[in-house]
Image: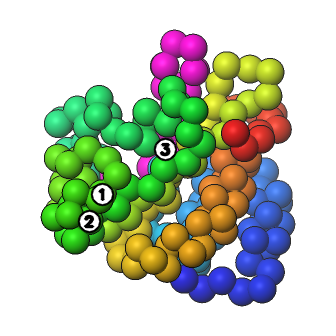
Amino acid sequence: MNLTKYALVDAFDALSACEDSESTWLCALKIANELGVDAINTGALDIESATMLWARSSMSQTWLEEYMRREYFKVDPLIELFTSKQSRRTIYCDRDSIANDTHGGNLELSTALNKAGYSLLHGSKFMVPQKPTGRIVTLCFHTFEREAFDKALSMWTTVSALIAGFSMDPSEVVRQNWTAC
């Protein structure tokens, strides 16, 4: 993790300067990478119908194809965030967490994530005020010590909030205000 004193302020400034959804997405990827994040998933969901409105991911195409083929979205605890009262959840996919059943997710999915090279995923949910929609941002790490991650949890949630606040569906024209749950 490379976190300078003003990293979050710099991230806000960089995201604020983006003019469209594609430049925002590329900026979010750059910021996340500079902070040690290996991939990002973000999307919007209609909470009432549990319908995915849009999604983006920088995880490998091979993993995304496996995720869809095996229908992991049916057991993904990070997608379940939308219908739960929780606002964030961390899935530990390292071998020790899987072996000790302390992974915090679905065992088959956590094992598959580990085989795909991931050791930790952190999802945060953000709701749109006065609307039945929300955003989720998942930060994905290839290697990260559980204790180090847990100590910096509020920072990672803030990074997720920044990404959620500026992420847009490619068809969106107007920015919307997002607040954390």
Image: magenta residue range: 42-62
Residue 25: quarter of image: bottom right
- Of badges 2 and 3, nearer the viewer stands 2
Rendering colour mode = rainbow
Q: Position of residue 15 (x, y in %)?
A: 76, 60
| Sequence order check, earlier mark of 1 and 2 | 2
Image point (77%, 39%), residue name: 178
In front: 20, or 146?
Answer: 146
Q: Position of residue 100 (x, y in %)?
A: 20, 64
Dot 1 lies on which element?
loop
The answer to whether mark 1 and mark 2 are in CB contact below 8 A is yes
Q: CA distance from mark 3 to mark 1?
A: 24 Å
Q: CA distance from mark 2 to mark 3?
A: 27 Å
Mark linked to residue 75: none
Which residue is disc 1 drawn over? 103
Q: Amino acid at mark 1?
A: His
Q: Quadrant of the N terminus?
A: bottom right
Q: Amino acid at mark 2?
A: Ser
Q: Is residue 27 visible?
A: no
